[in-house]
Image (cartoon, helix red, strand yellow):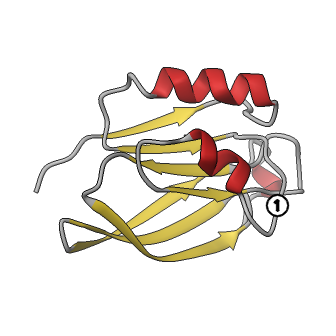
Amino acid sequence: MGFKIASINVQSIKDTSRCVATLGYLENVRADLLFLQECGIPHLSNYRRWSSWWSHGPSIWSGGNDCRSSGLGILLRGGNFTISDVKEVVGGRLLVADVKYKNTPIRLINVYAPAVKTERLA
């Protein structure tokens, strides 16, 4: 089992043109899993808007309303990944996804901690 992982602070993809440009750039990153932080997206009941812009495989999103910069994404490239379960532990801050890579279960955890230490969970 071998795949490449990248973790990237995207500094907001709330704006449509910025999101399309950022995801266009990420198309050229040689990684099978892309963990995005600081997406700047609000907490929503669905994230079809962002998912539709990533056409290279499944994507998982979590937004937050606590500050402008919160928000996470996990982009999966190719047909080797399937999503089993997703948990927004803290919206826009802590996202857990159980996926399968070629039928091997993997737990993915994406974290974007607040910059102010007193705002972090104990």
Residue 100 is left or right of residue 102, and the answer is right
Q: Is residue 28 above or below residue 38?
A: above
**Residue at disc 1, secondary structure:** loop
Query: Residue at image x 71%, y 57%?
Result: 47
Query: Residue at image x 60%, y 25%?
Result: 22
Foreground residue among 14 and 107: 14
Residue 104 is left or right of residue 61, and the answer is left
Residue 85 position, x and y percent, is 48, 79
Q: Is residue 108 above or below residue 71?
A: below
Foreground residue among 90 and 24: 24
Q: Indicate the quadrant containing the N terminus: top left, top right, bottom left or bottom right.
A: bottom left
Q: Can residue 112 be seen in this snapshot?
A: no
Residue, disc 1 = 43
Residue 106 position, x and y percent, is 30, 69
Q: Can residue 64 be seen in this snapshot?
A: yes
Residue 115 position, x and y percent, is 74, 41
Query: Residue at image x 75%, y 50%?
Result: 117
Q: Residues within 10 Å of mark 1 (few under 14, many from 20)?
A: some
Foreground residue among 95 and 77: 77
Q: Indicate the quadrant containing the C terminus: top left, top right, bottom left or bottom right.
A: bottom right
For the residue marked with disc 1, what is the amino acid? His
Residue 111 is left or right of residue 15, and the answer is left
